[in-house]
Amino acid sequence: MKMWLFLAIVLLLNFACSKDQPANNAETKHFVLKWNENQATTQEIEEAKRFAEEVYTKYLEYFGVENLPQEKTIINLGGDAFSENGGAPRIPFVNENGEIFLFRFETGYLGELPHEFAHVLRFYKGWSSDGFLEEGLAELMSSKLFPENVGFSLYGFSTTIAAGLWLNEDNLIPLQELKDKHFDLNLACLVQSYPLRADFFKFVLEEYGKEDFMNFIYAPDAGSYGSYERIYGENFEALEELWLQNLQQRIDALGDTQSQLQAYQAKISSLQFYICKRGIDF
């Protein structure tokens, strides 16, 4: 399937979902859950209520109350991600009103909630026009605050393994290309784009510290090429090179690298993800 056609189908499906008006709702201290009949079981609702508050608490501890939404966040549970007729799955997203839309994958509804709540947090305060930063930040915080999460894109593995899988392959997408061609590559190459970005921002956060990182993501020009050099003293190209060196060092330091890489590769292969190829897709 052509990249533009795949993206068009996904966006149309998500747009249609955002127009539905669920008939049922349940509230917690910081969330309103909505769903239609047969879209969620009682157990799924109770699990979602509990886990949503856990997500809120961890983001509160990391970012502070001043950076979190002041109103309750709406979470829509939209049923199975895959239809009985097959085709492209419905992908979790946050709409223009800051509402979260989740769909049931093999791991359940909640694997992508930490990622999507990071988007809500940014929707409330700090949202930039740079998709590379926004998606990278969301996946970074999801993996940092919930390392045991078995949902997309890490499936319980570290960003070191998920990004390291592409280090010595002809499928390593340069970060500048992921940044400059975000709309074209983000979903089309999602099995590569999400872990690569997350691990890059993990490196930046750990190498330069939380204070600089917070200044970076809340800067008026957050995500621009100039913001990297102004805050970190290195241009984007230099940071990418430092990250690649650091990632290779982390891979070399792991005692069971090959077994972990093989296990992660087996996982993404079982899900039949498309892998973008140099010279064809980028």
Image (cartoon, rainbow, N blue to C red):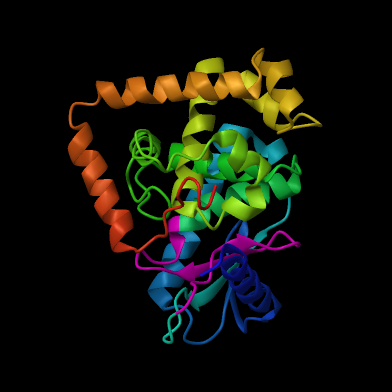
- Considering only vertical position in the picture, is 238 above or below 2? above
Question: Which residue is located at x 45 percent, y 42 percent?
Answer: 195
Q: Is residue 119 left or right of residue 197?
A: right
Q: Report if residue 11 is visible in the image.
A: yes
- Considering only vertical position in the picture, is 14 above or below 195? below
Residue 149: give x, y in percent of width and height. Answer: 38, 49
- State yes or no: residue 89 in magenta: yes
Residue 128: give x, y in percent of width and height. Answer: 75, 41
Q: Nearer the viewer, residue 75 or 94?
A: 94
Q: Nearer the viewer, residue 38 or 202?
A: 202
- Considering only vertical position in the picture, is 8 above or below 24? above
Residue 256: give x, y in percent of width and height. Answer: 18, 32
Question: Which residue is located at x 58 percent, y 18 percent?
Answer: 238
Q: Report if residue 145 is visible in the image.
A: no
Q: Quadrant of residue 227?
A: top right
> Where does the magenta region start and end?
87-111
Q: Residue furthest right?
A: 220
Q: Nearer the viewer, residue 43 or 205?
A: 205
Residue 232: give x, y in percent of width and height. Answer: 65, 16
- Considering only vertical position in the picture, is 162 above or below 97? above
Question: Which residue is located at x 63 percent, y 19 percent?
Answer: 211
Q: Is residue 184 left or right of residue 250?
A: right
Q: Residue furthest top?
A: 233
- Magenta span: predominant SS is loop
- State yes or no: residue 9 in magenta: no
